[in-house]
Image (cartoon, rainbow, N blue to C red):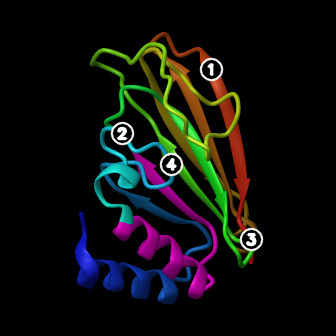
C-alpha cells in the first residue's frame, strides 16, 4: 500500500511529531486480524507487521488509524510490547449498502463497537495539550448515537 520509503517517512514524521494524538487516515483497516477484503492482514501482511513493529520500536504513542470501505463500523484496539495503545476506527457506510451479519473474526475488535447499518462518525478532540482526549461517536442515519468511546492521550 505505502511501500518501505513512504512507511519510513511516516514513522519519521510520527517520531518528530509533537501532536498529543496522531491520526492517520488510510483506506484499508490496519489492525483487523481477519484476512478478508480490504484489510492490511489480507492485502499487505508484511507491511502491516513492519508498521506495527516500527510504532513499537520507536515508542510512538497515541496512534489512531481512521479507515473505511468495509461497509460496517468497528473499533479495533492493540497494545504493543511497549504498552502503547494503537486504535483503528473504521467507519462506513453512510450512503452505500451496509454489511449485514459480519462473521469475520477480528481479534482486535472492541466489544460492542460493531455496527452493521448505515452510520457516520464524529471526532471530538478536547482538553489541554498535555492531556488531550479524543471522543469517537457513531450515529445512525437519523443522528441517534450507537456508541461512543473516549481515548485519553498518554505521555
Tag in front: 2 or 1: 2
| Distance (Cα) linking label 4 and label 1 | 27 Å
Element type at marker 2?
A: loop
User: Which secondary structure, mark 4?
Assistant: loop
Of marks 3 and 4, which one's residue comes earlier in the chain?
4
| Residue 79 lies within the magenta run | no
Could you give the CA–CA distance between mark 2 and mark 3, rounded to whole angstroms? 32 Å
Residue at the image position 37 percent from the left and 17 percent from the top: 98
Say whether marks 2 and 3 touch (CB < 8 Å).
Answer: no
- Spatial CA span between label 3 and label 1: 27 Å
Say which residue appears at 50% left-offset and 48% top-offset: 33
Residue 36 is labelled as: 2
Number of residue marks: 4
- Camera-near label (2 vs 3) is 2
Residue 49 part of the magenta-drawn span: yes
The C terminus lies in quadrant: bottom right
Vertical side of 20 occupied by 54: above or below: below
Label 3 or label 1, whichever comes before in sequence order: 1
In this figure, which residue is indicated by the disc labeled 4?
A: 33
Q: Which residues are magenta?
A: 46-67
Calculate the distance from the C-alpha at mark 2 to the C-alpha at mark 1.
Answer: 28 Å
The residue wearing badge 1 is 145
Q: Which residue is mark 3?
A: 154
Amino acid at each position: 500500500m505505502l511501500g518501505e520509503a513512504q512507511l519510513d517517512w511516516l514513522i519519521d514524521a510520527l517520531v518528530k511529531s509533537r501532536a498529543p494524538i496522531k491520526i492517520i487516515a488510510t483506506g484499508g483497516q490496519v489492525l483487523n486480524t481477519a484476512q478478508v477484503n480490504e484489510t492490511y492482514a489480507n492485502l499487505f501482511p508484511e507491511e502491516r507487521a513492519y508498521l506495527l513493529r516500527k510504532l513499537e520500536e520507536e515508542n510512538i504513542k497515541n496512534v489512531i488509524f481512521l479507515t473505511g470501505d468495509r461497509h460496517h463500523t468497528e473499533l479495533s484496539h492493540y497494545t504493543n510490547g511497549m504498552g502503547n495503545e494503537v486504535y483503528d476506527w473504521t467507519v462506513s457506510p453512510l450512503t452505500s449498502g451496509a454489511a449485514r451479519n459480519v462473521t469475520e473474526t477480528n481479534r482486535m475488535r472492541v466489544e460492542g463497537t460493531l455496527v452493521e447499518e448505515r452510520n457516520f462518525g464524529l471526532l471530538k478532540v478536547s482538553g489541554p495539550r498535555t492531556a488531550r482526549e479524543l471522543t469517537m461517536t457513531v450515529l445512525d442515519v437519523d443522528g441517534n448515537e450507537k456508541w461512543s468511546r473516549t481515548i485519553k492521550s498518554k505521555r
